[in-house]
Image: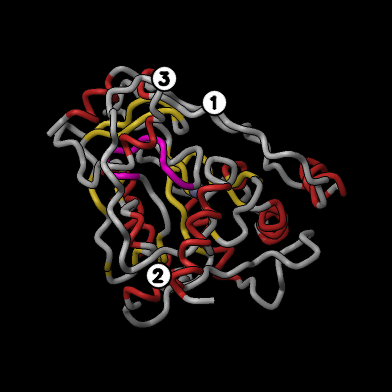
Amino acid sequence: MQRKTLGCALVALSLAVAGLHEARAQDKGTVNPKPLPPLANPNDPKLAAKELFGRKPEPAPLEARSIGFYAKGCLAGATALPINGKTWQVMRLSRNRNWGHPHLIKLLEQLAGKGVKVGWPGLLVGDISQARGGPMLTGHASHQVGLDADIWLTPMPDRELSREEREEMSATMVVAASRKDVDPKIWTPAHFSIIKTAAMEPEVERIFVNAAIKKAMCRQAGSDRSWLYKVRPMWGHDYHFHIRLRCPSDSPGCKPQEPPQHSDGCGHELDWWFTDAVLHPKPSPTPKRDHIKLADLPPACRQVLVAP
Ligand SMILES: [Zn+2]
């Protein structure tokens, strides 16, 4: 298949699954992203908000704040994670999703440094948020308020990745083919350590991982299990893990999520995830999801959108 054709097929595929699954780390990007065509009627109240937020490549020059809920909100005054740090590199640059609340950007930079001390050589950072947050044209229900970040389960190589590699490279599947545990040939103590290090950050409220990864974390945690409740089983999340910060104090319009229960979430609590019905679900017709419209978002998101 010609490369161009493949690219189109991938775009079509990612649009088909948009909103239903997390953007998977193995979804490829392109070094020559085409600008989106202008909207015929940007003021149409029926227009999906993702069409508007997806066309804002620059942050709103306002004071930094997260507005609304993780899956229904936006972001003012975003800062970008630089695409290269000593201990991190940003992947899929064509998506322009390396924007976040300044607290999250700072946390990622610090986590990248702490990771080195526990054996994880550096972070490959996937999607954070769009420049003004909001719903996205592909992937992710959440990641809208600049407090969510996907980290690849691939350790950073000891060199600067090329533009092509950042678009084309695949993240590492760490779950075994049985889906019941991690793959012992892939999973390392450093995988455990980077997830634990992230979970121990006070600002981190949740970390989403595949249930097989949660099972491994439970097994390896030892006696200090105080942080384990933050690591939550979730669909997918077998190529990357997902860091979610609590609402920052500077963002009164940020709608908090109920804090996770303080049980470590191990043992029988995981059984359901490994039942046959969950591991091998019967194919069902793809549910059509309602698109979030601008009027569905907090009113402040309109200001974020129209800011120069
Ligand atoms: Zn995510």
Label 3 sits on a secondary structure element that is: helix
Judging by the rendered image, the residue that carries numbered circle 3 is 296
Mark 1 lies on residue: 258
Q: Does the residue labelled 1 lie within 8 Å of ligand 1?
A: no
Q: Which amino acid does label 3 sit on?
A: Asp
Which is closer to the viewer, label 2 or label 3? 3
Does residue 135 belong to the magenta stretch? yes
Say what secondary structure mark 1 lies in.
loop
Q: In the rendered structure, which amino acid carries the disc numbered 1?
A: Glu
C-alpha gap between disc 2 and disc 1? 31 Å
Query: Where is the N terminus found, in terms of image quarters?
Result: bottom right
141 left or right of 307 in image: right
Which residue is found at the position 19% from the left and 36% from the top?
60
Above or below — where is 245 with respect to 165? above
Residue drawn at x 63%, y 49% is: 225
Nearest the viewer among 80 and 140 is: 140
Is 37 magenta? The answer is: no
Q: What stretch is highlighted in magenta?
A: 130-138
Indicate the position of residue 55 as horizontal and vertical percent values.
Answer: 28, 42
